[in-house]
């Protein structure tokens, strides 16, 4: 047993503790007062809608997972490494099956984390609204602990899965299979959820607000439940799945890099498992941070969330320093970890600048809205483009710092980049917890309104909601930069994996095939975004037809005497979203393999590079512009520049509607897309390399 | 005298003939009937406005050219190659001055071509409108020959300038100075013109159509002249300058590659001048093609333009084949030339698919417009994203084909890529001629309306205008793909130029500094786009204030008894546009040098690569989405989906207004931006390499 095994066992333990705490909090939330009968009825619509959506989603995903699992089992049963080189082809089904099992376990862990998060969210929303009648502190606690269920379940399951697989197989490439499972599921859940949520949102708004003039969240609207379910699907399950996949992928990338350096003899075996151990410390730090999140007497939930994040980061830094110093690791590991951690937090907080109503961009966009929707959109889009620059600069700084600090310390610069991505993502438990808090309080506010609670309760939920929006903006910036650093590490890992097969990979921009790969890769994220956004509008038209059908056939609905068939809308949106995923999934999974097989491993390297460059840029553009338009609208609704009902307001509503699929459908899926493509490339690198060697 | 000199002399001669024909056509157009007094008065407003704009523009540009010229003279007086290597620094002012002179001559040639094009356009518009009263054939001839003045002057001056400099100095790097002059001026003229034209357009519309409800092109609107001048500025001078700079840059890139291969002994000296000779043949082919453009009895101007393009391409292919076969050149040259030529034309025609009302994307965008502006924008934006794919695929095919065909023929793959860019751009004379035709007939239509000509004349100008729009769409696709291939060749040339300084450049994506460079480079085109678009809205607000001031102070304007102060609006828009250029110009010229000096030549290579990737992608997105929204609006205005005044129409107007700065301000400048940055990198490569060697 290698001497780093005890550390991995402790990491496994930390993961189990995290899952245990998540389960405990899950029960705690469910024990809270579920409120009045009316509130429970409203909440039950959303809960049933969410279950109905999840059932459809997971049925479809099971099919995909089984199909991909079989393909993986078959492909990896061949001894690809020596394919064609020594005449015959050796077949070893055990490796194929192990890889397939790892893949399926990864997918299942991601699904369980998403399911737990969703199901606690839909039971916490009404409980938080009810608690808001008592005190803001209590309402905050319910919502935040419910969010923590998601955060802790996610990191816990990830750490348990990776540690267990590594302990059983000792092979980081099998852990790569686990990561691919998690990411493939995340991509489908996230892109599907993104299409679903905006389909429901746009359809509900167009028929409800625009055609009939009934308010948002009116229970007479058949799409209202689908819309509310969508908030949970996109924001809770989606963001969780997104960070889950970066979290696992960054750890695997760093492990693969460590293994490659170990194989060359430049690092010892402990550095292979170090990324896992850092994750374990991050889990402990998150548990500490979550423990300290508390709204004081002054009732400032935003400050409580921020201080929780800061405590977690400090705790993680201290634990990482202790590990490095006491464990006798090279100091370069610490510098790389800190470079990642600090940059992640800084980028997160600065991305707030472009989307918060306290700063110039939102302010200016709101100001020009009086001149019409087009000016609002041009201005918001332009600030979205500018918002790319600071995040890119942050990613560049983190990458160069961690590379050169690691290089100078003698642990290999590329390994340092991998560790910095792990350092950035290690605090994910806390980040996801405060992010998942957002949609819960948003839903609580909706339920308070739909169930006719008092104005005081609604005001309290408003305060909670505002804090949630800031947390959300921070998480988005964090998620994108973390994904960027992760895929850069994966990119390096891909080159190492290919290199280990005897093809020394020079991905030079002076080679035309590499440039061809980069150009094709660069065109993929825009194409993916376009396909998902067009699905939204197409599905929304189908759903509008269904809403109109219900109103026509059952006049009692609009009169308020009949309950609409909420489930029909949920089902339609879910079905539409899932069937829209076929081509995007093909792009993500099959395209990299095709490029590698046809144009060779160098071109595939270029392809990955190109997809990363534009993937990050479009993700930042779409998320930030979308958030900016949303807040410009809210700023005008707060009474500025003419207030509600003014021309400026109408213009800002158009901007917000454009921003919806930007920030909730296309933008956030791009992180996952580039992660999946990079994982596919690394996983199938032996196949690509084998073709190249013929 | 090297034996390729006679060929270069003949090329010089072809250029002189081209300029001569341009001057002859210029006079011919001016001899045409200028129409009624009223028509002449209206035309004189636009002419005077255009002169006023050009005076301001060229005054500002002269200052920039002189300043840059001095910097170049100083920098290139030092013997950079041996700086710091052998202790002392040798100073040789003659090389510095030669380079500065080449730079200034390049800028002046670009300016003269733009000036000729603009000034013939503003005198041809009224003459074409007048001729439309006689026959469509005559009106077409006036407009097309006026467009040819621009096309022929442009290629003629380019060829004359490059040949003369090469004959005098025998040094392609001095020709690079000429190219940089042309491109720097093109960037400022194009970005400035793009900001100017949309400032005027948006301000005129917002006050005129929206606030006062007076029609477009109403002479009571003080901004109407600025708006009409803007059409010429952006479309005639802008597109001309754009293709001028790609045209020169592609030739220089191929010459530099040829020189580098010659220095290594793998190609003989004739291949250095071959790109120039191909340009000369392209000029002859364009003269032949232009001769054959004629509207038949059936009055189909679109078909006339297309057949002119096809005749030019065939003539060029035949001439190039004759040159290669009779001149004893390697056949690989012919394959590379044809690969570029064919791909350019194919991309041009297919880009029509995404922007023409005859196909699905425009049709679908128009259809969904009934559901509001936001859906119109999401749909159009999505198709814009999809439109990136075929053009990128075309560029990839052209690059790989020309590379491998050249490689297999033994002339060096990279040189083949350079030649294919030259092959694509060689027919620019014809392409620019039919492009410049568009805004002339557009203006003719405006004048016909403003001067109260008969409905028959207006209908004729409508037919002419529709053909112009198709030509414009084709040119945009062509211009972007040509620029892409050109910058790829320039990118290779940059590596060769650095390589010649003893730094063997490996621009590998596995080096973090290269990735850092790529990320920073990739963020630059979006930033540039944002800055120019924000300038448009900012300047439009200033101009709106000026329009309102005129209406307030002089009530006779709105009553129609007083002529507004058109020049005040022209001046304001020009001033605003020029002062908005400071930061974008800094990005283009200083940033590459900074990246090279601070992060090294590999990072600069990455930076160029990154800027090319996103530059091409955003240029395609913005140009195509903008064109699509424009045509979706026109499609609805033709009576479909509710027709003018319907909700769908209102939504499509918002989309069109968003698209205006996309397609006319930000999109088209990006080609020039990436060309300028690549030229700066190649030009200052010795400086960067010298820093690196310390």
Image (cartoon, coloured by chain):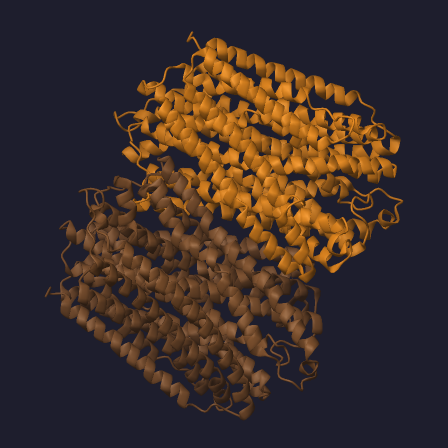
Chain colours: A orange, B brown
Q: Is residue A209 left or right of residue A316?
A: right
Q: Position of residue A215 (x, y in %)?
A: 81, 49
> For the N terminus of chain A, which image quadrant?
top left
Q: Position of residue A67 (x, y in %)?
A: 51, 31
Q: Nearer the viewer, residue A153 or A656?
A: A656
State whether residue A359 appears in this view.
Answer: yes
> For the C terminus of chain A, which image quadrant?
top left
Q: Is residue B324 left or right of residue B492?
A: left
Q: Residue at x 67, y 81 (%)?
A: B557
Q: Nearer the viewer, residue A281 or A55?
A: A281
Q: Residue at x 19, y 42 (%)?
A: B87
Q: Residue at x 34, y 44 (%)?
A: B597
Q: Is residue A315 left or right of residue B504?
A: right
Choose top left, top right, bottom left or bottom right for residue A467.
top right
Q: Residue at x 33, y 84 (%)?
A: B24
Q: Is residue B14 left or right of residue A624?
A: left
Does B304 sit above or below residue A503?
below
Q: Position of residue B117 (x, y in %)?
A: 40, 76
Q: Position of residue A85 (x, y in %)?
A: 26, 27
Choose top left, top right, bottom left or bottom right for residue B541.
bottom right
- In this rendering, the count of numbered labels is 0
Does A565 sit above or below residue A242?
below
Does B167 sit above or below residue B487?
below
Residue placed furthest toward the front: B88
Choose top left, top right, bottom left or bottom right for residue B350.
bottom left
Does A156 sit above or below residue B69?
above
């Amino acid at each position: 047993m290698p001497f780093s095994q005890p550390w991995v066992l402790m990491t496994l333990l930390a993961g189990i503790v995290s899952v245990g705490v998540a389960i405990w909090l899950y029960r705690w939330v469910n024990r809270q007062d579920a409120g009045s009968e009316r509130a429970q009825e409203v909440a039950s619509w959303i809960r049933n809608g969410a279950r109905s959506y999840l059932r459809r989603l997971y049925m479809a995903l099971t099919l995909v997972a089984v199909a991909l699992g079989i393909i993986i089992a078959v492909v990896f049963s061949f001894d690809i490494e020596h394919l064609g080189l020594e005449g015959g082809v050796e077949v070893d089904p055990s490796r194929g099956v192990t890889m397939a099992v790892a893949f399926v376990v990864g997918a299942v862990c991601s699904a369980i984390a998403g399911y737990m998060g969703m199901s606690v969210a839909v039971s916490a929303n009404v409980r938080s609204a009810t608690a808001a009648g008592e005190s803001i502190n209590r309402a905050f606690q319910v919502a935040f602990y419910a969010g923590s269920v998601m955060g802790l379940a996610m990191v816990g399951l990830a750490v348990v899965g990776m540690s267990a697989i590594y302990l059983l197989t000792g092979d980081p490439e099998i852990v790569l299979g686990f990561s691919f499972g998690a990411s493939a599921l995340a991509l489908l859940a996230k892109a599907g959820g993104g299409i679903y949520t905006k389909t429901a949102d746009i359809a509900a708004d167009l028929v409800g607000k625009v055609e009939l003039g009934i308010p948002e969240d009116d229970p007479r609207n058949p799409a209202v439940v689908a819309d509310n379910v969508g908030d949970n699907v996109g924001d809770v399950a989606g963001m969780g799945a997104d960070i889950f996949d970066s979290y696992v992928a960054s750890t695997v990338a760093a492990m693969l890099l460590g293994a490659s350096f170990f194989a060359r003899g430049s690092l010892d075996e402990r550095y292979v498992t170090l990324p896992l151990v850092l994750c374990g410390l991050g889990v402990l730090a998150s548990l500490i941070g979550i423990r300290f999140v508390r709204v004081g007497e002054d009732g400032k939930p935003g400050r409580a969330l921020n201080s929780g994040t800061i405590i977690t980061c400090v705790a993680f830094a201290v634990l990482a320093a202790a590990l490095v110093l006491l464990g006798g690791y090279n100091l370069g590991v610490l510098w790389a970890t800190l470079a990642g951690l600090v940059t992640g937090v800084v980028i997160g907080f600065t991305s707030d600048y472009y989307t918060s109503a306290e700063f110039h961009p939102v302010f200016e966009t709101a100001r020009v809205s009086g001149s019409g929707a087009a000016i609002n959109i041009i201005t918001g889009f332009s600030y979205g483009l500018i918002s790319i620059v600071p995040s890119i600069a942050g990613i560049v700084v983190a990458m160069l710092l961690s590379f050169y600090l690691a290089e100078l310390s003698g642990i290999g610069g590329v390994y340092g980049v991998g560790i910095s991505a792990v350092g950035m993502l290690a605090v994910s438990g806390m980040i996801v917890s405060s992010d998942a808090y957002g949609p819960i309080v948003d839903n609580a506010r909706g339920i308070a309104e739909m169930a006719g609670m008092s104005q005081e309760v609604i005001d309290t939920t408003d305060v909670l909601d505002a804090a949630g929006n800031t947390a959300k903006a921070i998480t988005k910036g964090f998620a994108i930069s973390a994904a960027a650093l992760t895929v850069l590490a994966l990119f390096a890992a891909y080159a190492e994996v290919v290199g280990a097969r005897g093809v020394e990979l020079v991905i030079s921009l002076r080679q035309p095939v590499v440039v061809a790969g980069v150009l094709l890769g660069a065109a993929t994220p825009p194409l993916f975004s376009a396909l998902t956004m067009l699905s939204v509008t197409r599905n929304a038209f189908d759903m509008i037809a269904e809403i109109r059908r219900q109103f026509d056939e059952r006049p009692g609905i609009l009169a308020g005497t009949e309950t609409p068939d909420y489930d029909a809308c949920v089902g339609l949106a879910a079905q539409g979203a899932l069937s829209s995923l076929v081509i995007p999934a093909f792009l993500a999974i099959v395209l990299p393999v095709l490029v590698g097989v046809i144009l060779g491993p160098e071109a595939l390297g270029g392809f990955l590079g190109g997809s990363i460059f534009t993937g990050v840029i479009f993700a930042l553009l779409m998320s930030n512009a979308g958030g900016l338009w949303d807040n410009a609208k809210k700023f005008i609704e707060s009474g500025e520049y003419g207030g509600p009902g003014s021309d400026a307001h109408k213009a800002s509503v158009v901007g917000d509607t454009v921003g919806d699929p930007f920030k909730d459908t296309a933008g956030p899926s791009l992180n996952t897309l580039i992660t999946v493509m990079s994982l596919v490339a690394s996983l199938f690198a032996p196949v690509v390399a084998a073709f190249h060697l013929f």
